[in-house]
Image: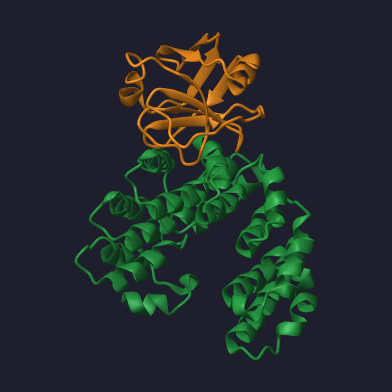
Chain colours: A orange, B green
Amino acid sequence: MTKIIKLDFGGFSLSAELFDTSPARAFAAHLPYTVALTQWGGELYGSIGVSLAEEAPVADIPAGGLAYTGRGNLFCVFFGQTPAWPVEYIGRIPDDQWPLLIDASPLEQVVISF
Amino acid sequence: MDLKQLYDIPPWEWPGNATAIIYEAVSEPGRPEPDRLMALELAGEPVVINDRLAEALMTIIQDGRESEEVRCQAVIALGAGLEGAYLDEVDLEDDFLAEINTDEIVESLSSHLLIKIQEKLSRLYRDAEMPERVRRRILEASVRAPWDWHKNAVTAAYYSGDHDWRLTSVFCMGYLPGFNEELIEALRDPDREISLEAVGSALNHGLSEALPTFKDLLLTSPSSDKELLLRAIELVPEVCPEQAGEMLSSLVDDKDREVATAVLDALALAETMMELDDDEDY
């Protein structure tokens, strides 16, 4: 069963769903996270400080996709960028919400919680 | 005095108008590229960097019409200035360092411009359209005045699996806390370029694990890897000046003149560094 989470970027918040996969459940089990963000093009990323097992990393993530990678324990939000390497696709921000990220940059921090 | 003459003498002997000569050459896009590259190399000397020159370097970095080579060299030139200004900010709060005669500082970046440049470099780094080589140089230069975004950027670069990005990240780790685990791993990396870069960075953080790796690299660098060997020799006075004689003795009479010259230079520098250390002890 999918879980709804909140991404609070400070000035605004977005909701997102976490998939019913093993890595997504492991990610949810450690909520909440406060993540310092760095941007590269249409991607935000930052360390969650927790190592999670990966299951099936993929090379492409659609815009609005949430991902995790064990390389550096990074949480990533994609809104136009292709991942630099295969990452675990763990959830998504609805199509009517993720475009807000494009104009909102630069974003320096996100608090992820239920 | 012209640019070429400046290039041929050490910075501490430069005349008072050196910054103006360099600025003029740097900010004239019509000049031949080799001249501008030479000027940009000189602009990286901490004795000449000031706000005006730094602004000119930023203009070059942001200008997509400039060649990648020129943009990269402009970023590198900014690095030392950023580090100097950052250390001034941090250190001048220290009672001891506040007693240093600041009249001796010839040129430096203002703290206002330091912040402005850091913000701009951060924005340029985020730009996915920026050529990769320029982005790497931006990370390497900007990390000398560390900001929050560097930690994630360096982490991602290290784990990217790309040789050049990993090299950049290991260099940057020397300026950031929190990467000891990665540095120790990098010291053992089979890629010798990575492990040599890790030596300098690890020693910046006082990681003693770096010393045996460094000695091993120096003694076992194959002759085919001359560039790496030269870089290792260059590092000796910085890393362990008191052991320079012992570590370099087998290379003093190397058949390769460039290697032998590098060894002599390193030994001389090591001696100077030890003398400086002795002076400080008094």
Depth check: give the residue in front, B81 or B12. Answer: B81
Depth check: give the residue in front, B279 or B171. Answer: B171
Please tell me in which quadrant of the rendered image residue B254 appears. bottom right
State the residue at coordinates (66%, 76%).
B266
Compared with residue B172, is residue A104 higher up or lower down, i.e. above or below? above
State the residue at coordinates (63%, 61%).
B191
Q: Position of residue B2 (x, y in %)?
A: 31, 76
Is residue A112 visible in the rendered image? The answer is: yes
Q: Position of residue A27 (x, y in %)?
A: 61, 20
B161 relative position to A107: left or right: right
Compared with residue B256, is residue A103 higher up or lower down, i.e. above or below? above
A21 relative position to B57: left or right: right
- Quadrant assignment for the N terminus of chain B: bottom left
Please tell me in which quadrant of the rendered image residue B224 appears. bottom right
- Quadrant assignment for the C terminus of chain B: bottom right
Is residue B282 visible in the rendered image? The answer is: no
Depth check: give the residue in front, B124 or B120. Answer: B124
Compared with residue B18, is residue A42 higher up or lower down, i.e. above or below? above
Total tally of numbered discs in the picture: 0
State the residue at coordinates (61%, 43%).
B176
Compared with residue B12, is residue B88 higher up or lower down, i.e. above or below? above
State the residue at coordinates (30%, 62%).
B23
Q: Residue furthest left?
A: B30
Q: Position of residue B259 (x, y in %)?
A: 62, 83
B85 relative position to B275: left or right: left
